[in-house]
Structures are given as structure tokens and as C-alpha cells.
Image (cartoon, rainbow, N blue to C red):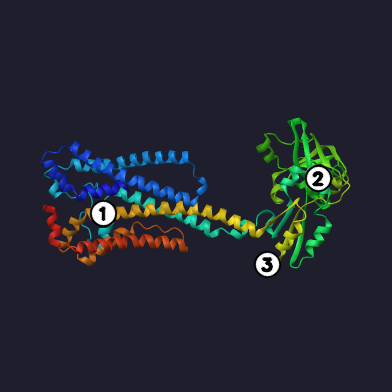
Amino acid sequence: MIYGVFYLSVIGRIHQFGQLRTIGMTKKQIKKFISQEGGILYLRSAPIGIMVGGIVGYFIIPDGFHILNTLLIIALVFIVVYLITMLSMRKPARLAAAVSPMEAPRYVPQDGMKKTENKKRCRNLTPMGLGVMNFGRNRKKAVITMFSLALGGILFMTAATYMSSFEKENYARQGYFADAEFHIGYSQSAIQLDENGMSGMQAAMPMGDEMVREIAAIDGVEKVTEIKSFGVRFDYQKNDEYGNDDMIYPLTEEETKEISKYLEKGSADYDKLMSGDYILTAGNGNAVEIYGWEFTTGDKITLHYYDGSKMAEKEVTILGVLNDQYVIDHNGLEGWFLMPEQAVLNWLSYDSLNAHLLVSTKADKETAIGESLTEMLSKKTELSLETLADRKIAYAQTANQMFGAISGLAIFIMMFSILSMMNTLITNIVTRKQELAMLESIGTLCGYVLSNMLYTMGAFYMAFRFPVSFALAYAGVLIAVPLVITFVSMKIFSKETLVERLREMEC
């Protein structure tokens, strides 16, 4: 982009550089002259760009700003932009310095075209033919421009497809909210403050049958789902782990009989599990990531829990290890361990292992039910209430921030590719001003044919990727930009007579 700007600037003043060479300016001085122009442009533009970028970035993610990091990034950007500017000026500077005083008045840019032998010299001078010929004048630039447009289109459409396919409703309905509007559970702070942990609170049965019936009686409640889990602390002496808080998932009788299909190691003998002396584990992959070790069949685990009157402990043996598919099929597990529910209840003097209550409601009653649940739980400080409505707001903010980052990057790349196309088209038209005037003067081109030829040149930079509205919008931009540039160029050309354009070759 910077190269294109300087290239156009140098081509437009090539005759002036020839005059400077005539009065004694050396090639080295011309290069230095152009380099100083680039330096002035850099010093004026870079601070403005950095300031605007910083302000925009701050408004997108205010919490991401830190003074030290910002200063380091500003310094890095200054250096990178300076290097890019200097590198972009090298070729235009060499071009200006290479033109002799004699060539400068009649200089016509050739865009690196080379004469080739054994090629067809007679061609049909139609708008399409001339457009195709011009497309091949500088194949390197054309290929880079087309690749840039293709890449911009792919990234833009990928981002647009992702955002249009993203369902915020489903995003918020992950986990407990898949079929529920309210989630009641034990407060984490309450668990930490209770000397007996979660099992100590479960012994008081705040989420027992009475509370379930009370919630189910609220007008508009369709279903109350009980999710059971038993809070324990475990010691794993083999791996030097002590007092870790965890959960035991209580298996129903049917689940206990069918659990063997998920076994990775060991066994799932029904009688041994029902005895309460054996336990199953799951999620070994996560254990390796978190602790660096895995549960092994035959190892001893000591469990600490509140039995209803005191803290008790029970040594159990790992009977089997379940594979990761079990965790996937059951939407994840809160803990590492599994036992039959009845085996757990045999240790306790209370009969409720509820750890979560999920409340499904009618859509038109959701707000009223939320108020009733809030009032009900205000008397039970150990419980917390999470609502789907609050989650939607929080998740929507997260999704919007993510969309902002994705769309910002996609639009930036797309705009960069479009600007690259505009630069290529403008360079082609401006540098061929005299050539087009010559063709028009000998009757090869009339205004209508000239316009068609220029439109044809622009058509080669289109990139259609996906047959959706975003693709059509992007394609529309690719079509509109060449047409607008050509239209404006033709208007500018029409302000000068054919003779005036031809005389520029003599200036």
C-alpha cells in the first residue's frame, strides 16, 4: 500500500526529477530526497494512526490496557512502520534515480513488461482483449492482488459464517441450563466455611423432598430435576494427596448394572460395589493434566465425610477405571468417583444426596417464578440461585466481545485487500494515461470502448467464495470499487482535451 502511494507520486513527478538531474542533482541525492519525503510522511502519519488505533482498542476492551504493555507496543509499532515505510520507498527511489535527464520528458511506465519473441503480434483490440492484455502487464502484482482478495474474502466469509451460525440461546443453555431456567445449588463460600464441608450441609437436607415439593407447587413450574452428588474429602497416599475436596456420583441400580460397558481397566462387579468397600473412578485424562498422575485399579483411597452425627472416614479400593466416553455421554462429572447410591446411603443417617435442583418453567411464568425462588432462598443462605436470564446477559456480552474481535480482524483484512485492489487499479490507469490518449487519438479507442476496457481490467480482481448474503455483499464491493474508480478516472480524463493529454509527453 505504501509502495503504491510512493510509486504513483514518483511517476507523477518523473519529469521534475529529470529537470533536477539536468541542473546537477545526483542519483544519490534524488534517492535521499525521496527518502526524506517518506520520513516526513511517517512522522506525520504514524502518531495519528497509533493514537486512533489505541482509542479504538480501548473502547473495545477497556480492561486490556496496561501502561507498560501499551508503551512497549507503541514503540514496536513505530519501529515496524518505519521499516515498512523505508522498504516501500526503495524501488520508487531507484526508479526516479535511474531515469536520465534525456528520458525523463518522454518517460512512459512499462510495469516491468518484457518483450518476448515468437508471440502472436496481431491481436483483436476489443475491450475484453485489451483488458486481458493489461492484466498480464505485471503478473506479479496481479497475482498478489488476486491472492489478497481471495484471502480477504475467505477470512471474511469464515467469520461471517461463524457469527451467523452462532446461537446465543444455545450458548447460554449449556450444562445445567440445557432444559431448565433456574439452577439451585450449594454456595461455594458456604461449602468452604462449613467445617464438615458439603456433606455437612447435605445432612441438614436443605434441598430435600420438602423443598422439591414446595418448588413444584409454584404456578408455572413444569419440572424439578434432582441431581445427586455426595461431597467428600479424599486422601490418596500413593500419590501424596491429602484432604482434597471432591464428589461421589451416586449410581442408580440400573446405571450400576450397565456401567461395565464404559470400563477401561479393572471390573465393575455389582456385589463388590454394593458392599461399599469399592469405588469406580473416571476422568483419568483430566487427573493426568491436573495432578500429573492417574488413578490405578487396586489402589486404596481414604474418604472423609459427615455421616449425620460426626466426621467419619472409609477406606475403599479402586475397583475399576472408566473411559473418557462415560464423561462425555453424561455431560461431565463433578468429581472423580462413582458408587451405587444405596452403598453411599448405608454410611449415612440421612437420605438426601441432592446437590443441584434444576427448575423448568413455562416461558410466560419465568419472571414470576424467579421472584418466588429468590424469596424462598433468601431464608437459606447456604444455597445459591442462578438464572438463565442472567446467564444469557453474561454470555451475550462474552459472545459480543468475541464477535467484535473476529469481525474487526476480518473487516481489517478485507479492507486491506480491497485497498490493495484499488491501488493496483489506480496505478494502472494513472500510469497509462498517455498510452490511452495515444490509442484514442488514432481512433483505436472511443470513450465507450475505453470505459469498457477499464471495466474489464477491474473484473479480474473479483473473488466469489460463498453463495450467501455476505458473499454477495463482498462481491458487490469488488464489483463496485473498479466501476467507481473507472468512472471517476473517466470524469477526470474528460476535463482535459485529447491534445492536452498527448502534450504531457512533451513536457
Viewer-side label of 2, 1: 2
Task: Report if the CB atoms under discs 1 and 3 are less than 8 Å apart.
Answer: no
Mark 2: few/some/many CA within 10 Å (<14, 14-19, 20+): many
Circle 1: residue type = Asn
Number of marks in picture: 3
Task: Report if the CB atoms under discs 2 and 1 are less than 8 Å apart.
Answer: no
Give how far apart the Cα atoms at labels 2 and 1 are: 78 Å
The answer to whether residue 251 is seen in the rendering is: yes
424 or 144: nearer the eye? Answer: 424
User: Which of the labelled discs sits on residue 428, or is there none?
Assistant: 1
Circle 3: residue type = Ala
User: Which of the labelled discs sits on residue 363, or is there none?
Assistant: 3
Residue at image position (40%, 39%) is 75
138 or 233: nearer the eye? Answer: 233
Mark 1: few/some/many CA within 10 Å (<14, 14-19, 20+): many
Circle 2: residue type = Ser
Q: Quadrant of residue 432?
A: bottom left
Q: Is residue 133 left or right of residue 14?
A: right
Of callouts 1 and 3, the N-terminal one: 3
